[in-house]
């Protein structure tokens, strides 16, 4: 009985971290980055670019972009990580596409938007990571590359991927400031 209660507590704690992390993540992406027209790194940055170009929903686009990466990396990263991350991705998608389009967005200084986007995205990701989960995307790609090539720096791989997305954002948004804010 005690073991069952402990499992239920862990699942509820995971869910709480996912919800709070997803709210923070959605604030960073939707309230700040989207409105200031810059793309942070990762698949969420690509989803913001797709939203800007074609009006595609940010959360669903991120989820769809995750599919091939997840299929490739699931064996490497393990079933538990995959299932926890899938739950996190679905919850984040709901906040990004269902809740936050109806909340007030920040319309002030793009520099402040970039700073607060980073704070909220970082806090959301930290909450996911603390519970052994991920928002998907380049996390899966980076961890898979690292598993295959352990001598590579996790930071360097992440930075390389993010720089590509941020540079693309600068091109799509049509100004160097968009790339600088994304950084």
Image (cartoon, rainbow, N blue to C red):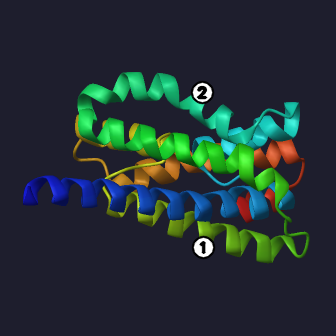
Q: Closer to the N terminus: mark 1 or mark 2?
A: 2
Rendered location of residue 58, percent (x, y): 72, 41
Q: Residue at x 43, y 37 (%)?
A: 86
**Mark 1 neighbour density, 10 Å: few (under 14) some (14–19) many (20 or more):** some
Helix, strand or loop at mark 1:
helix
Helix, strand or loop at mark 2:
helix
Q: Quadrant of residue 147?
A: top left
Q: Residue at x 78, y 71 (%)?
A: 113
In the rendered structure, the answer to whether residue 31 lies left or right of residue 66 reads right
Identify the mark at residue 100; answer none if there is no mark: none
Q: Quadrant of residue 102?
A: bottom right
In the rendered structure, the answer to whether residue 61 lies left or right of residue 133 reads right
In the rendered structure, the answer to whether residue 114 lies left or right of residue 10 reads right
Rendered location of residue 79, percent (x, y): 25, 32
State the residue position of label 2.
Answer: 64
Q: Is residue 37 visible?
A: no
**Mark 2 neighbour density, 10 Å: few (under 14) some (14–19) many (20 or more):** few
Whether 11 is drawn above or below 148: the answer is below
Q: Residue at x 26, y 58 (%)?
A: 10
In the rendered structure, the answer to whether residue 113 lies left or right of residue 79 reads right
In terms of depth relative to the viewer, which is nearer, 61 or 166? 61
Rendered location of residue 93, percent (x, y): 62, 43
Whether 13 is drawn above or below 134: the answer is below
State the residue position of label 1.
Answer: 119
Specify the quadrant that holds the C terminus: bottom right
Q: Distance of mark 1 from mark 2, alpha carbons?
A: 25 Å
In terms of depth relative to the viewer, which is nearer, 58 or 150? 58
Q: Is residue 170 visible?
A: yes
Rendered location of residue 112, percent (x, y): 78, 77
């Amino acid at each position: 009985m005690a073991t069952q209660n402990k499992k239920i507590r862990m699942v509820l704690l995971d869910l709480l971290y996912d919800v709070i992390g997803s709210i923070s993540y959605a604030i960073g992406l939707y309230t700040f980055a989207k409105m200031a027209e810059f793309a942070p790194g990762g698949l969420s940055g690509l989803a913001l670019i797709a939203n800007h170009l074609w009006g595609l929903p940010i959360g669903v686009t991120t989820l769809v972009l995750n599919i091939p990466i997840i299929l490739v990396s699931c064996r490497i990263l393990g079933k538990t990580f995959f299932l926890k991350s899938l739950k996190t991705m679905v919850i984040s998608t709901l906040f990004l596409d269902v809740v936050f389009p109806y909340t007030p967005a920040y319309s002030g200084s793009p520099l402040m938007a970039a700073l607060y986007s980073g704070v909220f995205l970082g806090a959301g990701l930290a909450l996911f990571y603390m519970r052994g989960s991920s928002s998907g995307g380049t996390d899966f790609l980076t961890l898979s590359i690292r598993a295959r090539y352990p001598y590579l720096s996790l930071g360097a791989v992440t930075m390389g991927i993010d720089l590509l997305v941020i540079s693309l954002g600068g091109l799509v948004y049509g100004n160097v400031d968009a790339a600088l804010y994304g950084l």
